[in-house]
Image (cartoon, rainbow, N blue to C red):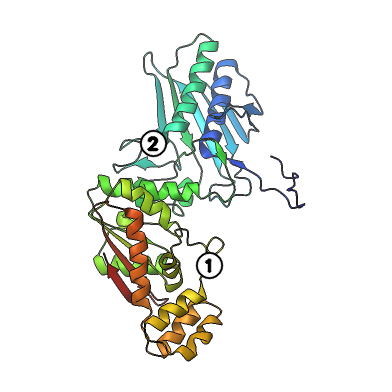
């Protein structure tokens, strides 16, 4: 897909990009080719897992005695990826006979320090598919030139440590930098899959650490309120965001004894309505639903129209609050029931907490 391709309605299609794993693989191919032949292929083509063959221009190259280095600028397309524009560098050098292919973390690439991730502790945070892609490239090139595949691959990302602070890596126990990621090699714009994947890895790490209580919050205010309430460690805090369904489906199959879901009134109202994706563009507050809940909680029938004409869920909440009607408890109860239904018979104690914008807990329901 190119930037000038359009949808049927004339709008521009969102441009795809490439994962850090694809960039690292292409850089490794360029560097190893130069180490053997003295020439860097530029651009360098690689075969992705689903058969596509993109070409990557080199942003830097260096060839010395017993080593070669190539760098590629990551293009995430139209996806708001924090690693867009980062330089992915691969440095290769020959290893002693029978060493095999060895992966190293250079500057800005993290090291795994906790169990539960797809890479063992103390290993560079280079995920299985990128490792496989780079391994296959090295074996293919070495076979072509009749050489043993005894090669060290050191992946670096300048400024990766600073960029990693904007990701889940510190919370997951990946220290010192970014992860080399990707299962297809392709970044799809505004895909939910990367975020949900991070939620899954967070649950895996929490289970491996033996935690008995985890928190899925819709935002930082609700997360802090509940983390402070229970004294939860950072690794217990799953960055659920809007993806309640993604969290619940995974934890149902990989249970933790207790799960707390926390969020503001509007987000939890959507959960109470039965929505499992709480994003504003994918689910909406039903004011009639809120008005009926308020009536059941004791609101005067004459005020129903006031709620129905409210612009936001927060405005509806303020109307009930001014009239001394507790609408948060029934909302938390309904949200808990919907979430519990998603968990089915999983052995998980479920709690839903509503937090106001000042960080105060205003409702709590346990099932």
Q: Residue at x 54, y 60 (%)?
A: 282
Q: Can residue 66 be seen in the rendering of this structure?
A: no
Element on which disc 2 rests: loop
Q: Residue at x 51, y 72 (%)?
A: 286
Q: Position of residue 310 (x, y in %)?
A: 54, 81
Q: Position of residue 184 (x, y in %)?
A: 53, 35
Q: Nearest the camera: 278 or 133?
A: 278
Q: Earlier in the sequence, mark 2 or mark 1?
A: 2
Q: Position of residue 156 (x, y in %)?
A: 48, 37
Q: Which residue is mark 1?
A: 284
Q: Quadrant of the C terminus?
A: bottom left
Which of labels 2 and 1 is toward the front?
Answer: 1
How many C-alpha atoms fall within 10 Å of the one at disc 2: few (<14), some, or many (≥20)? many
As drawn, the label of residue 77 is none
Q: Can residue 127 be seen in the rendering of this structure?
A: yes
As drawn, the label of residue 124 is 2
Whole-number angstrom distance, CA of label 2 to CA of label 1 = 42 Å
Q: Residue at x 37, y 77 (%)?
A: 328
Q: Is residue 248 above or below residue 140?
A: below
């Amino acid at each position: 897909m190119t930037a000038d391709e359009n949808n049927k309605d004339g709008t521009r299609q969102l441009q795809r990009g490439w994962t850090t794993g694809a960039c690292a693989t292409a850089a490794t191919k360029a560097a190893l080719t130069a180490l053997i032949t003295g020439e860097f292929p530029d651009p360098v083509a690689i075969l992705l897992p689903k058969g596509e063959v993109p070409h990557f221009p080199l942003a830097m190259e260096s060839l010395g005695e017993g080593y070669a280095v190539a760098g590629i600028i990551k293009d995430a397309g139209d996806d708001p990826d924090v690693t867009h524009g980062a330089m992915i560098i691969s440095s290769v050098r020959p290893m002693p006979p029978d060493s095999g292919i060895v992966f190293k973390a250079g500057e800005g690439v993290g090291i795994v320090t906790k169990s539960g991730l797809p890479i063992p502790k103390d290993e560079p945070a280079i995920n299985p598919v990128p490792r496989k892609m780079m391994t296959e490239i090295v074996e293919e090139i070495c076979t072509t030139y009749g050489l043993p595949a005894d090669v060290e691959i050191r992946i670096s990302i300048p400024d990766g440590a600073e960029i990693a602070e904007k990701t889940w890596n510190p919370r997951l126990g990946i220290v010192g930098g970014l992860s080399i990621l990707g299962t297809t090699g392709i970044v799809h714009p505004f895909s939910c899959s990367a975020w949900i994947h991070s939620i899954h890895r967070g649950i895996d790490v929490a289970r491996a650490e033996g935690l008995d209580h985890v928190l899925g919050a819709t935002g930082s205010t609700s997360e802090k309120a509940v983390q402070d309430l229970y004294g939860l460690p950072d690794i217990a805090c799953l960055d659920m965001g809007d993806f309640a369904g993604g969290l619940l489906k995974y934890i149902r199959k990989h249970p933790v004894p207790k799960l707390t879901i926390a969020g503001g009134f509007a987000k939890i109202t959507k959960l109470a309505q039965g929505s499992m994706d709480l994003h504003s563009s994918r689910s909406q507050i039903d004011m009639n639903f809120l008005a009926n809940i308020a009536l059941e909680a004791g609101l005067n029938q004459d005020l129903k129209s006031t709620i129905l004409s409210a612009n936001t869920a927060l405005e509806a909440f303020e109307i009930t609050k001014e009239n001394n009607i507790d609408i948060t408890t029934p909302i938390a109860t309904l949200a808990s029931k919907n979430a519990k239904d998603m968990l089915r018979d999983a052995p998980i104690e479920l709690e839903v907490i509503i937090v106001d914008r000042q960080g105060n807990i205003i409702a709590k329901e346990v099932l």
